[in-house]
């Protein structure tokens, strides 16, 4: 083990910031993080072992307990469930004789749930040793089981199992335009870097990750800082359930992303950039690095970019399974090899970002748009959209529709048009922006896709009338409770309370008082949580309470003025089943409070 750890630390130049990459290599080698490895890493990096322990315990894909040689994580997103995930999970567990949440006795396989894997348009999906497999069926599972039982290395499995499709259904301004390699960089240098920044400002480009901050203002503010060491970071931690458009851009518009990052670096005077790639997108890691090598060979990265004397390079860093790392400051903490706990603000990352240096952090789609604007000019981009929302938005559309996939629309497009294009009939509602967004009913289908009306990072999950709103909200509520980083009490405790309270109402054991308490907890979490995760965790409950109050009222029990949290009779259900008894003495009567 000592030689492996030594070689791994050398690979990352004995730096502490790539700690997640080091731990990923250790996990892949030993199927867990051995305690001896923690001691060796701590000694080799000269950091406290407690720092490493905290990082291992924080991220979903790290484990101190041995996992199987074939480590399977089933995507537990609402869209996977809509496509039959539960039955397929049961089938897989039965075939492999491994209950969900366990490691088989022989250590060959382990099976667990994980959050959305970004294959919502081609689910149900799973990860095996980190690599994505979509379009699960009993036939595909049979193939997987045979390969596992034959002890076939994952690297030798049939390649068609790992095929992930772009599924671009409707390209628009960006997706229809092929950017020649280096063309945007050349145009930016010839026009002038200040003039290029002015063009990006004139285009009206705003961040495409959901917040909508003006891109040129962010770049200009970072450029104006007194610090000379600056960084460029691309947020490719696309963890919002229902979102997968960045996956497609990373796969098929890779050069555009890197070109946008390089232009940003030239404007800022930055020499180093990072792509923080979500751990679930491991299948893209080698491809991204191969494209970086191509660009270095072509003089588009390195010490003398296009002969202009400019030095800039990009490094890919992988996450390890944490939704909160999509938040910008948590991402930067993770990039520095720490737990992904959101920072206190101010200052913003523009002032103190990566390693406390000025940093521009933008979404994948934002960098693609910036590269095209640098090449084609501001008018080309601003010709689309509305007065306050310029350009186009790329949407990830999934759920109950005939044609799930990627759609690009000019801002100002109505929800009604989107639903028609993707073949959505009998629509109950749309979750816009993923679980942290809002549930929109068909009564609001004239709403427009803009920053002012229907703002979204890109997720559109469509539900028809066969779906139960309570099942949807329950999935989202459990997701937030699972993904809370635990830093602040309102989120750590509040999401757990929301989960328990909602489950009680959903199971038919709630009272009118429980609905009031649910609303009070939700508002408290929203108003007092430290970061965006907690502030948005209550949105699925609050938006459905507002739009469908009658559903909640019909769900409560009318015979009691209250209902205990603990169901006495329900607690005996398993015992009755095991004993085969269902007589009066096998039941307990719930007594109403006087």
Image (cartoon, helix red, strand yellow):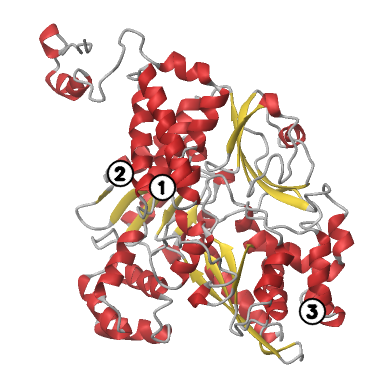
Q: Say which residue label 1 marks.
A: 74
Q: Is residue 51 above or below residue 460?
A: below
Q: Position of residue 97 (x, y in %)?
A: 26, 44
Q: Quadrant of the N terminus?
A: bottom left
Of labels 1 and 3, the one closer to you = 3
Q: Quadrant of the C terminus?
A: top left
**In this orientation, does residue 112 appear?**
yes
Is 18 left, or right, of 49 in this rendering?
Answer: right
Q: Secondary structure at mark 2?
A: loop
Q: Is residue 511 above or below residue 26?
A: above
Q: Secondary structure at mark 3?
A: helix
**In this orientation, does residue 139 appear?**
no
Q: CA distance from mark 1 to mark 3?
A: 46 Å
> Of callouts 1 and 2, which one flags the residue occurring earlier in the amino acid sequence?
1
Name the quadrant containing residue 475.
top left
Q: Say which residue label 2 marks.
A: 100
Q: Which residue is drawn at the image coordinates 30% and 16% (left, top)?
A: 562
Query: Quick one: 553 or 238, which is closer to the camera?
Result: 553
Q: Position of residue 427 (x, y in %)?
A: 64, 26
Q: Which residue is drawn at the image coordinates 44% and 45% (left, top)?
A: 528
Q: Position of residue 577 (x, y in %)?
A: 18, 20
Q: CA distance from mark 2 to mark 3?
A: 55 Å
Of labels 2 and 3, the one closer to you = 3
Disc 2 crowd, CA 10 A, few/some/many (<14, 14-19, 20+)? some
Disc 3 crowd, CA 10 A, few/some/many (<14, 14-19, 20+)? some
> Of callouts 2 and 3, which one flags the residue occurring earlier in the amino acid sequence?
2
Name the quadrant containing residue 195.
bottom right
Number of the label disc, if any, that sits on residue 193: 3
């Amino acid at each position: 083990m000592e030689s492996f750890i030594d070689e791994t630390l050398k690979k990352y130049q004995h730096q502490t910031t790539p700690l997640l990459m080091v731990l990923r290599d250790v996990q892949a080698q030993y199927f867990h993080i051995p305690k001896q490895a923690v001691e060796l890493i701590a000694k080799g990096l000269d950091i406290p072992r407690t720092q490493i322990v905290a990082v291992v315990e924080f991220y979903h894909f790290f484990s101190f307990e041995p996992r199987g040689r074939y480590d399977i994580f089933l995507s537990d997103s609402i869209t996977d469930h809509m496509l039959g995930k539960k039955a397929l999970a049961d089938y897989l567990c039965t075939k492999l004789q491994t209950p969900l949440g366990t490691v088989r006795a022989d250590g060959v396989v382990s099976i667990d749930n994980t959050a959305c894997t970004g294959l919502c348009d081609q689910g149900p999906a799973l990860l095996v040793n980190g690599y994505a497999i979509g379009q699960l069926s009993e036939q595909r599972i049979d193939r997987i089981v045979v390969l596992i039982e034959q002890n076939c290395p994952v690297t030798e499995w049939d390649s068609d199992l790992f095929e992930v499709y772009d599924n671009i259904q409707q390209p628009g301004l960006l997706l229809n335009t092929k950017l020649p390699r280096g063309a945007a960089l050349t145009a930016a240098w010839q026009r002038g870097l200040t003039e290029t920044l002015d063009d990006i400002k004139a285009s009206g480009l705003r961040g495409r990750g959901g917040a909508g901050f003006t891109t040129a203002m962010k770049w200009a503010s970072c450029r104006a800082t007194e610090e000379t060491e600056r960084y460029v970071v691309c947020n490719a931690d696309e963890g919002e359930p229902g979102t997968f458009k960045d996956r497609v851009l990373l796969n098929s518009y890779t050069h555009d992303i890197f070109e946008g990052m390089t232009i940003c670096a030239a404007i800022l005077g930055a020499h180093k950039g990072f792509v923080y790639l979500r751990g679930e997108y491991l299948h893209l890691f080698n491809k991204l690095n191969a494209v970086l090598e191509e660009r270095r060979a072509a003089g588009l990265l390195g010490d003398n970019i296009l002969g202009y004397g400019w030095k800039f390079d990009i490094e890919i860093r992988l996450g390890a399974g944490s939704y909160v790392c999509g938040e910008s400051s948590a991402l930067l903490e993770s990039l520095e090899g720490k737990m992904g706990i959101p920072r206190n603000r101010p200052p913003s990352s523009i002032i103190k970002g990566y390693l406390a240096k000025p940093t521009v952090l933008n979404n994948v789609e934002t960098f693609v748009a910036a590269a095209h604007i640098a090449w084609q000019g501001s008018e080309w981009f601003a010709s689309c959209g509305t007065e306050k929302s310029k350009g186009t938005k790329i949407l990830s559309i999934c759920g109950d529709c005939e044609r799930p996939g990627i759609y690009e629309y000019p801002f100002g497009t109505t929800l009604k048009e989107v639903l028609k294009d993707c073949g959505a009939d009998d629509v109950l509602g749309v979750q816009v922006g993923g679980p942290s967004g809002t549930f929109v009913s068909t009564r609001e289908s004239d709403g427009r896709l803009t920053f002012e009306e229907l703002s979204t990072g890109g997720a559109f999950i469509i539900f028809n009338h066969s779906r139960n709103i309570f099942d949807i909200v329950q999935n989202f509520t459990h997701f937030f409770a699972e993904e809370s980083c635990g830093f602040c009490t309102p989120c750590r405790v509040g999401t757990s309370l929301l989960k328990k309270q909602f489950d009680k109402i959903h199971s038919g054991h709630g009272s009118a008082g429980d609905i009031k308490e649910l609303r009070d907890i939700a508002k408290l979490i929203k108003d007092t949580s430290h970061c965006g995760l907690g502030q948005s965790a209550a949105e699925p409950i609050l938006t459905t309470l507002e739009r469908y109050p009658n559903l909640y009222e019909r769900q409560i029990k009318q015979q009691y003025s209250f209902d205990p949290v603990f169901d006495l009779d329900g607690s005996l259900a398993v015992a009755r089943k095991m004993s085969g008894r269902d007589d009066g003495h096998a039941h307990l009567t719930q007594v109403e409070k006087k």
